[in-house]
Amino acid sequence: MLFSPALNELIDALRCLPGVGPKSAQRMALHILERDRDGGGRLAHSLEAVLEKVGRCSQCRMFSETEVCPLCASSNRESSRVCIVEMPADLLAIEQGAMFSGRYFVLMGRLSPLDGIGPDELGLEQLAALLQAGEVEEVILATNATVEGEATAHYIAGLAREAKVAVSRIAQGVPMGGELEFVDGGTLAHAFATRQVVQ
Ligand SMILES: [Zn+2]
């Protein structure tokens, strides 16, 4: 036992963060004790606050401190278009690009039967009800271009068709500024398959 039990516990707790192994957890814990006790206090306080205050928006499932998040509550957003994303970070990336003025639905995952993630875990019943309600005219599928992301998009496209709602998928292919020789074969094949008529 090189460290005190409390310090050991902190090192252990820090390892719940992604990418933090025993060495970095130890470095972080020692840093807080040696050099930044105030920062450590702020961290402890904000961790407690975020866990207590932040839940999910009842409409889009995004993290929110209110029952309905500010984005869903805003009258400036078109409720006729809904963009489906896997994770909160995807929503933030689209918002930062300021290219979309509709609403979102955050799955908080992707269909992955092997990991026990099915339609229930992703709130797809709630999504189906939203689409059936008649206010939504277009669903934009912005799930990732992975096998699970594609399967999820395919499933949701089915829900949209059942509800007679138009459905589109964000394009995937050669990145802006990208050179063909460095694009992998799968991406290039997809870019060809989803080519668009030049106006
Ligand atoms: Zn919301």
Image (cartoon, grey):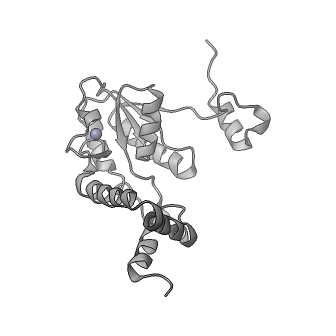
From this viewpoint, which residue is outermost toward the right?
181
From this viewpoint, which residue is outermost toward the front?
35
**Which residue shows up at 53% across the image and 46% down it?**
150
Look at the image and tell me whether residue 139 can be seen: yes
Q: In the image, is residue 77 above or below residue 51?
A: above
Q: Position of residue 164 (x, y in %)?
A: 34, 32
Residue 165 lies in what quarter of the image? top left
Instruction: Please name whichever residue, 121 or 164, is drawn nearer the observer in this view of the structure.
Output: 121
Q: Position of residue 51 (x, y in %)?
A: 28, 58
Ligand 1 falls in which quarter? top left
Q: In the image, is residue 74 above or below residue 66?
A: above
Q: In the image, is residue 135 above or below residue 116?
A: above
Residue 98 lies in what quarter of the image? top left
From this viewpoint, which residue is outermost toward the top?
199
Q: In the image, is residue 199 above or below residue 88?
A: above
Q: Position of residue 134 (x, y in %)?
A: 25, 31
**Which residue shows up at 31% across the image and 24% down it?**
78
Q: Position of residue 87 (x, y in %)?
A: 43, 47
Q: How many marks?
A: 0
Horizontally, residue 162 falls left or right of residue 182, namely left
**Which residue shows up at 26% across the image and 45% down it?**
57
Q: Quadrant of the C terminus?
A: top right
Look at the image and tell me whether residue 157 can be seen: no
Residue 39 lies in what quarter of the image? bottom left
From this viewpoint, which residue is outermost toward the bottom?
1
